[in-house]
Image (cartoon, grey):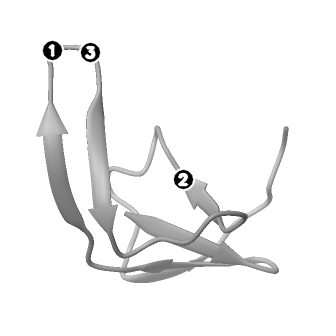
Amino acid sequence: MYQVQGDTATAEPVKLGLATSERTEIAAGVQEGETIILTGGYGIEKQAKVKVQP
């Protein structure tokens, strides 16, 4: 999972919980209100400059 702070995305480990074919629970490693990258993160280095768009 990539966590975004300002204009930087950083790879952070997470613990996965229950999973279905459509959804996967993140059981630990991210807090409510943090900005994360959900899709399109393949190929991003461990720390990369990003531009957040809603």
- The label on residue 21 is 1
Q: Residue at image x 15%, y 14%?
A: 21
In the image, taking residue 14 as reference, residue 3 lies left or right, namely right
Q: Residue at image x 36%, y 76%?
A: 29
Q: Nearer the viewer, residue 36 or 48?
A: 36
Q: Which class describes the residues within 10 Å of circle 3: few (<14), some (14-19), or many (20+)? A: few
Q: Nearer the viewer, residue 47 or 3?
A: 3
Mark nearer the N terminus (2 vs 3) = 3
Which three-letter amino acid code belongs to the residue tagged 1? Answer: Ser
Q: Position of residue 49 (x, y in %)?
A: 66, 76
Which three-letter amino acid code belongs to the residue tagged 2? Answer: Ile
Kindly identify which residue carries mark 2.
37
Q: Residue at image x 47%, y 71%?
A: 30
Kindly identify which residue carries mark 3.
22
Q: Answer yes or no: do the residues labelled 2 and 3 have beta carbons within 8 Å?
A: no
Determine whether the residue tagged by mark 1 lies in a helix, strand or loop: loop
